[in-house]
Amino acid sequence: LFISPFFILFGLVGLFPLLYTGWVSLHAWDLIGGQGSWTGFDNFAFVLHQRQFWVALRNTLSIFLISAAPQLIAATAIAAALDSNLRNKTFWRMSVLLPFVVMPVAVTLIFGSMFGERYGLVNRTLADIGVGPIRWHTDPLASHVAIATMVNFRWTGYNALILLAGMQAISRDLYEAAAIDGAGWVSRFFRITLPQLRPTIIFVIITATIGGLQIFDEPRLYDQNGLGGEDQQWMTMTIYLYKLGWTQLNFGRAAAVAWLLFVVIVAIGLINLAITRRIATSEGRTA
């Protein structure tokens, strides 16, 4: 009885949209005409045979991989700094959260001008030191790096506070005992902090995976067209879904893309879980 509100809310905002999207994906469904004829898995077959789908999947995975590791490392370093004896701790903790509460439009406009190919701040700085300009909006890898930078700017501080909460839950007696035994700061960090922080790190990795594979705001606002570049250099899965649903008005195919993205997220999440469990098991056997 006490937990029934959770299941009711989950059913309304989680399970029902998922099942309804699956139902839509099995029909010829458009925005104006609504539900059409039953098509079975034809929408999935159509999407999987489109080159744009595989380009979008590749771009999504590329941006995610470029942003994930630096974001986790930076968030852990910031959390460790905030966990030390700093003055004005509240100020610094609120400061690292500031990029997260800034509107994505503002962040993208600022970074979009910084990564401009002709008059951007980054290319101007490179020119001052004798380095040629980088084609931030033309080269696929460069555009992925620029978008990953925006993602990390927004989410690193948020993840740092989650990791900080995990660090503060670690017993200080462990650090005091290690200090008495002569362990330095680096040794305490790698032998106490990181092992004790493993559940929190796993949580951050899973949530970052879910959010990173659903990235939309940054690539959508990276240029004026908002459709992933002239040659789909940074078109992600969500932008491809948007094009099918709101540009071509084909909700059936857009729903099929949504379900395929859901399958990709679940698959990568399970891989992450299996890897972390194997690491934990091997470390336990070593100990």
Image (spheres, helix red, strand yellow):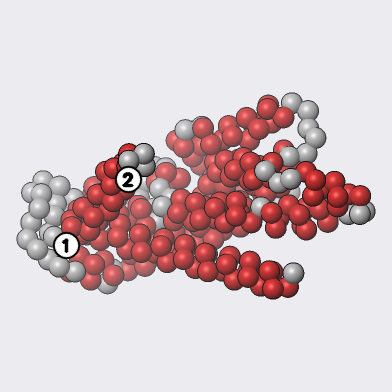
- Residue 26's disc is 1
Q: In terms of depth relative to the viewer, which is nearer, 164 or 21?
A: 164
Q: Residue at x 66, y 52 (%)?
A: 197
Residue 72 position, x and y percent, is 62, 52
Mark 1 / mark 2, whichever is N-terminal? 2
> In the image, 253: left or right of 97?
left
* For residue 121, above or below residue 247: above
- Residue 83's disc is none
Inspect the image, locate mark 1, and give the three-letter code of the amino acid beneath it.
Leu
Q: Residue at x 35, y 52 (%)?
A: 239
- Is there any visible trace of residue 177 in the rendered image? yes
Q: In terms of depth relative to the viewer, which is nearer, 60 or 19?
A: 19
> In the image, 271: left or right of 42?
right
- Residue 210 placement: quadrant: bottom left
Q: Secondary structure at mark 1?
A: loop
- Residue 8 placement: quadrant: top left
- Residue 7's disc is 2
